[in-house]
Image: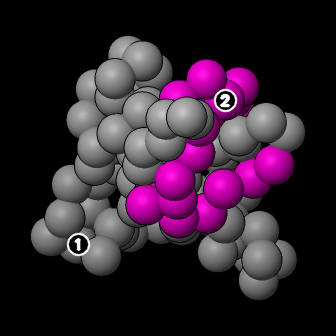
Amino acid sequence: MILKNRLDIILVERGLVKSREKAKALILEGKVYVDGKKVEKAGTLIKKNSDIKIYKKNHDYVSRGGIKLEKALEKFNINVKGKKILDVGASTGGFT
């Protein structure tokens, strides 16, 4: 019998992340690969002996909001170099 469990739970059990919330965030960001294939749902059942890789880009943001803002600037081709920017927000990192 092959044992399976949810991907987010296995990530925590293996010590790859500290919490299921962090696991879900990485999965939703498309950073988690199981046996070479990207998995996009935290509840996906995988074999307990599956090969899991997490591909994380190092960044200097205090929250995922910074990552979202970076992607929006890239997607809409907005150049902020040399400009003064005011970020008014109520969330961690200021981006809401």
Residues under labels 2 and 1: Cα distance?
41 Å
Q: Residues within 10 Å of mark 1 (few under 14, many from 20)?
A: few
Confirm whether the magenta stretch covers residue 53.
yes
Region rendered in magenta: 37-61
Spot occupied by residue 15 in the image (x, y as percentages of width and height): 38, 16
Q: Specify the principal SS of the magenta part.
A: loop
Q: Identify which residue is drawn at 71% across, 40% down.
A: 34
The quadrant holding residue 14 is top left
SS for dot 1: loop
Circle on res. 89? 1
Decide if residue 2 is on the left or right side of residue 92: right
Q: Residues within 10 Å of mark 2 (few under 14, many from 20)?
A: some
Label 2 belongs to which residue? Answer: 50
Spot occupied by residue 5 in the image (x, y as percentages of width and height): 42, 43
Residue 84, visible in the rendered structure: no
Q: Identify which residue is drawn at 66% across, 56% down.
A: 39
Please give the count of numbered marks on the rendered protein: 2
Extreme residue in the front direction? 1
Spot occupied by residue 72 in the image (x, y as percentages of width and height): 64, 75
